[in-house]
Image: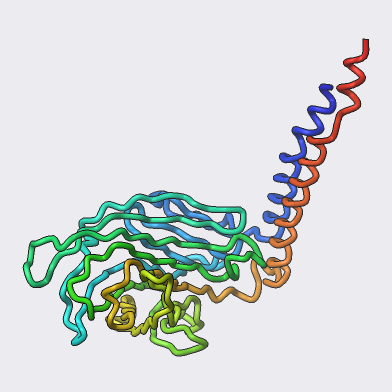
Amino acid sequence: MRLGSVVRSGLPALGAMLVAALLLATVPAASAWSPPSTDPVAWSNGLVLCQFAPASPSVAASAVAVPESGLTASLAGLAEANAGGVVVATASLATASWNVTNVSSDDAYDLEFTTTATVASSAAPGTAAGSVALSIQFVLPAYAGSPTGPTDAVALEFSEAGWPWQGAGDHLVLTLAAAPTYASTESLRATTSDGWILASDANATGAERERMGVNASATATVPGGPRSIAANATVALLSSAEARVTIAFSAAAGAFTGLALTAHVGIVLPSTVAGIPISEVLAAIAAAALISVALAAFARRVRRRPSQLVYAEEEP
């Protein structure tokens, strides 16, 4: 019985060792650069590194194989505007207290920031018009072929619920801030390439390293069910080291009780990682994931199978 127990308990450890060996063999550069120790959470899928701010929704995304690179994206503002574009209410994000929760799954790394923010009325400064529940999740697919998306992009999944509307014909305006993680090595520029609206280039070579995009539509919650509405994004380049991405949702949104939108920070991966073609690295990561799943399934079958050693010891 002891032998059977040892064999069964060793299977998960063997799987973990094989997966770790594969990743270390194919992506040695991943351990060459450690994120700052002040970050509460930092993780990587072997190709992309994500580092998070301690107490506010912000992510610095970069290629693992390119030190001192990255694009930092964060939530900068949420406001209600009337049909003329005049802001009538604003969420007080500066004083909001955010809860941070790791909601990762087998398919993706996922860090969620949530808060209930006060909404201030523009008509009566200092007066609270109500509150709104806010959430933003930073999702990094864990392996090639993940149902959550490609491994070279981080999704920023924003949602709000319970906005205290000031007018039935008003609409919401969301603002995201973007900046090079290292201003000394990269510069921002506006772009319209392949649906992306902002790019960050290496100062030394001019090569594009990261980019940012916003989905052209959002999902609104209405009494009759979810509805797709337009999300119009514009970029304000304040300098080569600072930009604002403003997303205005379609007008007459006053009846909506909730809203969800996804933006992305894409990483332009180098053609090789530590001299290994990037296609081979992706294949190795996918293989590691498949090996892990196969070993887990095998271990489960072994645990469920009756052990002859148990029966042998039970005989008188």
Which residue is outermost to the front?
A: 224
Q: Position of residue 2 (x, y in %)?
A: 82, 22
Q: Position of residue 202 (x, y in %)?
A: 46, 78
Which residue is outermost to the bottom?
A: 192
Quarter holding residue 151: bottom right
Which residue sits at x=46%, y=78%?
Answer: 211
Residue 182 in view, yes or no: no
Q: Position of residue 183 (x, y in %)?
A: 36, 72
Q: How many marks?
A: 0
Q: Quadrant of the N terminus?
A: top right
Which residue sits at x=26%, y=70%?
Answer: 78
Q: In this rendered view, identify the residue nearer to me: 173 or 47.
A: 173
Q: In this rendered view, identify the residue nearer to me: 196 or 183.
A: 196
Which residue sits at x=66%, y=72%?
Answer: 272
Which residue is outermost to the top?
A: 316
Residue 63 in view, yes or no: yes
Q: In this rendered view, identify the residue nearer to me: 31 or 263.
A: 263
Q: Is residue 29 above or below residue 237?
A: above
Q: In this rendered view, identify the residue nearer to me: 114 or 271.
A: 114
Q: Is residue 236 above or below residue 116?
A: below
Which residue sits at x=29%, y=73%?
Answer: 255
Q: Position of residue 201 (x, y in %)?
A: 45, 80
- Is 226 left or right of 132, judged from the image as shown? right
Q: Is residue 234 above or below residue 241?
A: below
Q: Quadrant of the C terminus?
A: top right
